[in-house]
Amino acid sequence: MTEEEWTAVRLSLLVAVTATAASLLPGIAVAWLLARRQFWGKGLVDTIVHLPLIMPPVVTGYLLLILFGRRGPIGAFLEQTFGIVLAFRWTGAALACAVMGFPLMVRAIRLSIEAVDTRLESAAGTLGASPLWVFATVTLPLCLPGVIAGAILTFAKAMGEFGATITFVSNIPGETQTLPSAIYTLTQIPGGDAGALRLTAVSIAISMAALLASEVLARRIGTRHLPA
């Protein structure tokens, strides 16, 4: 593999890990809110969360460019206040991947939380545990396989995201060119088929490794919570 191809692999891993880590806590919070609370506008919140799954990725990337670009309301504020620039940077690619993978994470965690017996939570509450402590000691350990599944889904989505990232941060080698963008570029140039095949094989290998790791972790966690 060429140095440019290795750079695309490293950048993809960095973007995917960052997107997954940034989505984890908000994903757990939103999933718990949708699974355990009834409030006005819940259907609207649920719709907004899942909107990136329905809209074309290019539309999502364009909306991110409008909002987080240097002239966008959020992007201008971040640059002027904190000196943070997201458009056409790898951090912007991580943001785009996090937005695209967020619905998958929330859905996996929400289903796992809904499967937890609420009587266990109520029993912990009657013993004097605060709601936060009940979540940390009862709900979260029991729904941990769903959290892992959501994180892996987000990671896999980030590794394969193309439309939103290329619209928001373009395809700049060494800065925003992730694996999908590099593969696309190689397919458009003469003699690039070999490089595209190499990166495709790497992408498949990373995805399979992530899925196997997810399966092993889920089994180990499930074994720990089996009754003695």
Image (cartoon, rainbow, N blue to C red):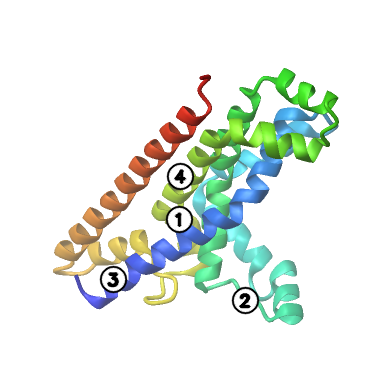
Q: Amino acid at mark 3?
A: Trp
Residue in the picture at 72% in, 33% down: 34
Residue at numbered disc 2: 85
Tell whether 70 sits left or right of 98. right
Quarter of the figure that contains the N terminus: bottom left
Note whether residue 43 is visible.
yes
Dots 2, 1 in contact, CB < 8 A: no
Of tags 2 and 1, which is closer to the observer? 2
Query: 150 above or below 139?
Result: below
Disc assigned to residue 6: 3
Sequence-wise first label, 4 or 2: 2
Question: Rounded to the nearest whole Å, what is the CA distance between mark 2 and mark 1?
Answer: 20 Å
Sequence-wise first label, 1 or 4: 4
Of tags 4 and 2, which is closer to the observer? 4
Tell whether 223 sits left or right of 98. left
Disc assigned to residue 181: none
Residue in the picture at 56% in, 56% down: 21
Dots 1, 4 in contact, CB < 8 A: no
Of tags 3 and 4, which is closer to the observer? 4
Question: Rounded to the nearest whole Å, what is the CA distance between mark 4 and mark 2?
Answer: 27 Å
Dots 4, 2 in contact, CB < 8 A: no
Residue at numbered disc 4: 152
Question: Rounded to the nearest whole Å, what is the CA distance between mark 3 and mark 2?
Answer: 25 Å
Note whether residue 61 is visible.
no
Residue 57, position in %: x, y?
Answer: 50, 51
Sequence-wise first label, 3 or 2: 3
Sequence-wise first label, 2 or 1: 2
